[in-house]
Image (cartoon, rainbow, N blue to C red):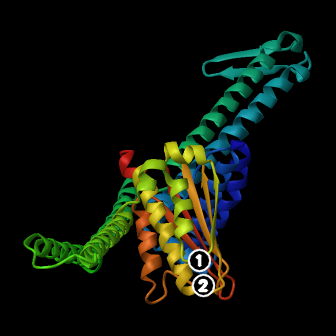
Amino acid sequence: MELVRAALLIPVIIVLVAGLPLFYITIPLTAQGERAAARLCGLDVSSARPAGTPGWPWLVRRVTSAGFWKQDLPMVVIGLVMSLGSFVIAVSGLSTAAVLALVPWHTTPENPTTIVLGVWATTQTDGTRMGWAVVLALVLLALTWLLLWGTGALRMLLVRALSGQSEEERLSRANAALSAEVGHLAAGRATLVDAFDAERARIERDLHDGVQQDLVAVTMSIGAVRMQLQALATGAQDDGDGTARAALLAGLDSAQERAEAAMRSLRETVHGIRPAVLTERGLAPALRDLAGRAPLPTTVSVRGEAAAGQTVSSPVATAVYFAVSEALTNAAKHAGPQARAVVALEVQEDQLRAVVTDDGVGGASPQAPGATGLAGMAQRVESVGGTLDVVSPSGGGTRLTITAPLTPPWARGE
């Protein structure tokens, strides 16, 4: 292989010398050819230079990058020197071996052969006694092959060393990726803080408008009953016809009803924080319970339900549950009065996928102005290492795919 490459690159040398004005074009192309040849030999190498379809913009980007001077140019120059060396080794070794192998056949008393090695010289007239020349030719062929193989291996090391990203570039890219991740986490943290504030405001509103009002009514009903009992005890009110007793029972009934209403309001408020069915029975039963309370007809299908109850961590289950809940709420608001929804949960070995589909009007987009619900869902899922994919063609319904690991990255120490 090294001999073939050396022979092929000799014309390249001539072209390069004759076409020095095309230096900035031939160097990147030749370097890419070296890398392509290395890949054909089974070496996994890639260029850190700008990607894209070869052309004038591609060449301009390559030449103006530092990699042209740090990688492409040294690779081509050293590669051409090595190719010249390989060509000289191959021609010298093969021609010498051929001569040595043919010498015994041409040596006769009428045509003697004189061999000179430094200060030592000998003249042979009998070719049958020159078998050592054939052995020497075979040794020379083996040595030539070893030299070419070593040169080829050295060339592969050169291509690998001068391909890919330098340590500085890797650190720069890693820092850029880390900065982007920090920005993403900061945005997610801000969203979570806003979500917590909104949740606190919701709890305060629910307690004020629901539970507090019911408890005030209970207090007033009990106070009225107490006043009636005091009136009966002091004789200020006559209960000869049972009217006072009926009023007492009505007051107690009213107090009980308002107390039960307060309990229901409190239960709904707590359910919005973390449903008991999710904590006690797992994600799949919680989604079925959610579908039963959804504002539009919803069916649920589950694959891997046993794994869903055992392997899905609490943070992931909570994030997926509330993302599905938000998706059903959005579907009820925007999909249309006749819309129906389907929730499909699939739990695999290392991740889960929840797909919420409705047959509404479509047209949903996380980038649309005012699409805070979808954006909040995406960031909620991303907070546990998951992703949210939205497919919602206009007039074709909406399909939300939630993919998340069974355990969030930060719980795995990543």
Looking at the picture, how far across and down is residue 196, in whole percent? Answer: 28, 70
Distance between the alpha carbons at the discs numbered 1 and 2: 10 Å
User: Who is closer to the viewer here, 208 or 93?
Assistant: 208
Looking at the image, residue 270 lies above or below residue 359: above
Give the quadrant of residue 185: bottom left
Q: Earlier in the sequence, mark 1 or mark 2?
A: 1
The vertical placement of 117 against 41, above or below, is above
> Few, some or many C-alpha atoms within 10 Å of disc 1 (few <14, some 14-19, many ≥20)?
many
Question: Which residue position holds label 2?
Answer: 335
Residue at the outermost left position: 234
Observer-nearest residue: 173 or 414? 414
> Which is closer to the viewer, label 1 or label 2?
1
Question: What amino acid is labelled 1 in the image?
Answer: Leu
The 10 Å Cα crowd at callout 2, few under 14, some 14 to 19, many 20 or more, is: many
Residue at 29% across, 69% down: 259
Query: What amino acid is found at the position of numbered circle 2 in the picture?
Result: Ala
Q: Are marks 1 and 2 in contact (CB under 8 Å)?
A: yes
In the picture as drawn, the residue positioned furthest to the top comes out as 129
Percent coordinates x, y for residue 352 in the rendering:
56, 54
Q: Position of residue 365 (x, y in %)?
A: 53, 83
- Secondary element under disc 2, as helix, strand or loop, is loop
Identify the residue position indicated by label 1 in the image: 296
Is residue 50 visible from the viewing direction of this image? no
Residue 239 is situated, as x and y percent measured from the top left of the image, at: 21, 76
Left or right of 410 on screen, residue 387: right
Residue at image coords 26%, 75% = 251
Given residues 66 and 129, the one toward you in this image is 66
